[in-house]
Amino acid sequence: MTDKTHDAKPSRRQFLAGAAAVGAGAVAGGSASAATPDPLITQVQDWASGLGDGVDATPYGLPIQYESDVVRRNVEWLTADTISSINFTPIHALDGTITPQGCAFERHHSGAIELRKEDYRLMINGLVDTPLVFTYADLERFPRENRVYFCECAANSGMEWAGAQLNGAQFTHGMIHNMEYSGVSLRTLLEEAGVKPEGKWVYVEGADASSNGRSIPLEKAMDDVLVAFKANGEALRKEHGYPVRLVVPGWEGNMWVKWLRRVEVMDQPVESREETSKYTDTLANGVSRKWTWEMDAKSVVTSPSPQAPITHGPGPLVITGLAWSGRGAIAGVDVSLDGGKNWQEARLAAPGTDKALTRFYLDINWDGSEMLLQSRARDTSGYVQPTKAQLREVRGLNSIYHNNAIQTWWVKANGEAENVEVS
Ligand code: MTE
Ligand code: CO
């Protein structure tokens, strides 16, 4: 159908298109405008002149080649050998809250193992009425739950205790991922075995050489812990514990045992390597805090940030980041543009949910001047994320783990950003 009015006078549609082009110019710095014809608009492009790929070109889909920089990365000096390794989630390049498994950080103490479902066994023993061994197929027959939770390594931001060091949100805060887990409640399995009255703890261990054994109080084990076999709808990846891992909501990542093989009900904690010499915090007086299971409220601006500089001039700017708390849901996030002198409340993309990442946005009209960008999380327990100075006052400078301090990015007038500390 032809629009007869089209040539005679500007139609409403042309007016809107023109307005959109001018509007886009104002926001993006003006590559498109009605005055200079844009070949991407006016000319037929190669991709519209023939067929694209057939649907079966890649049976299991991968990101388009243009997104090949959205990947996990290492910090070389942290990863001396490949079997005791760590890599980082590219949080600076993701949006929303769900971490795709393909770019979720990994931490292995003795390498990622390959375990077939057929060879999988889970034993529940110790202070139970009936010791039990489950196959993978057995686990699939228990009532299932689906829940989104974050998993944060206790060492996340650990390299920043002594001062600003790593230049990028991926490296300072990327030992975290947030997935939707499908699995069976650990409580269901423990009830199946029948916990004896003397049972007060469980000791959980994995099938890898490190075993990564940890003690968990029975109260938590009977609360929200999941024996999970799916993440974001699909089977766990090998590196995240295929076929079965433990999900310990809100608690340090080390307790999320991968390749879960045994749950022993005990009357006391084991005090294993992973909960004594590791994952404890040595205070200024040399005494180590015994256990820090819950991950305190924390947040970080993911963009702009050193790996995600501002690439446009003054005007509308989207500031965004992530917030989370192991003690409940995020109640609110404040953002400061001047190193913590003034704060404004960010917009939460969705109301915070229990022990899961929350996405926040602050849409500002950037005047083009430099900023000391910070975010500060508040959770439903009333806790407010501390500054580095406040945290150091309580914890001293010996700690490696559990650094949840406010992060500062120095965003310069040219849009580049740097990791700094303000005092
Ligand atoms: N479980 C086993 N069996 N072996 C391990 O090395 N690493 C732990 C934990 N569970 C580990 C494990 C640590 S320190 C963390 S932070 C998380 O797994 C990391 O989980 P991810 O590799 O899925 O990110
Ligand atoms: Co860890």
Image (spheres, rainbow, N blue to C red):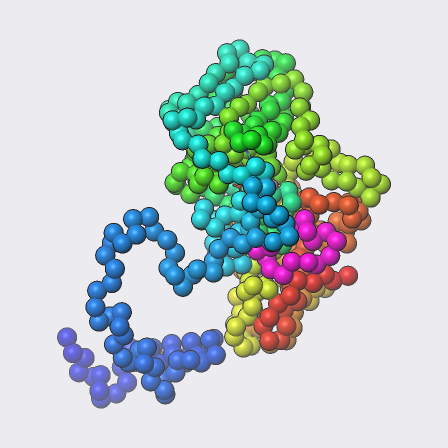
Q: Is residue 357 visible?
A: no
Displayed-image quarter of ligand 2: top right
Q: Can residue 106 be seen in this view?
A: yes
Residue located 67% across and 20% down the image: 268
Q: Is 364 situated left or right of 373 in this image?
A: left
Residue located 58% across and 72% down the image: 415
Residue located 52% across and 29% down the image: 207
Please name whichever residue, 271 or 227, is drawn nearer the observer in this view of the structure.
Answer: 271
Name above or below for residue 353 compared with residue 208.
Answer: below
Q: Quadrant of residue 383?
A: top right
Residue placed farthest to the front in the image?
A: 81
Q: Is 268 situated left or right of 121 in this image?
A: right
Residue placed farthest to the top in the image?
A: 129
State whether the magenta stretch is mostly helix, strand or loop. Answer: loop
Q: Is 151 situated left or right of 419 in this image?
A: left
Please name whichever residue, 296 or 85, is drawn nearer the observer in this view of the structure.
Answer: 85
Question: What quarter of the picture does the N terminus occupy?
Answer: bottom left
Report the label total: 0
Stretch in magenta? 157-171
Residue placed farthest to the left in the image?
A: 1
Q: Is 349 situated left or right of 266 in this image?
A: left
| Whole-percent x, y for residue 351 in the image | 52, 49
Residue located 45% across and 35% down the image: 114
- Does the segment drawn in magenta span residue 168? yes
- Does the segment drawn in magenta span residue 178? no
| Whole-percent x, y for residue 286 in the image | 82, 39
| Whole-percent x, y for residue 188 in the image | 48, 23
Question: What quarter of the picture does the C terminus occupy?
Answer: bottom right
Residue placed farthest to the right in the image?
A: 285
Please name whichever residue, 204 or 58, is drawn nearer the observer in this view of the structure.
Answer: 58
Name above or below for residue 327 compared with residue 331.
Answer: above
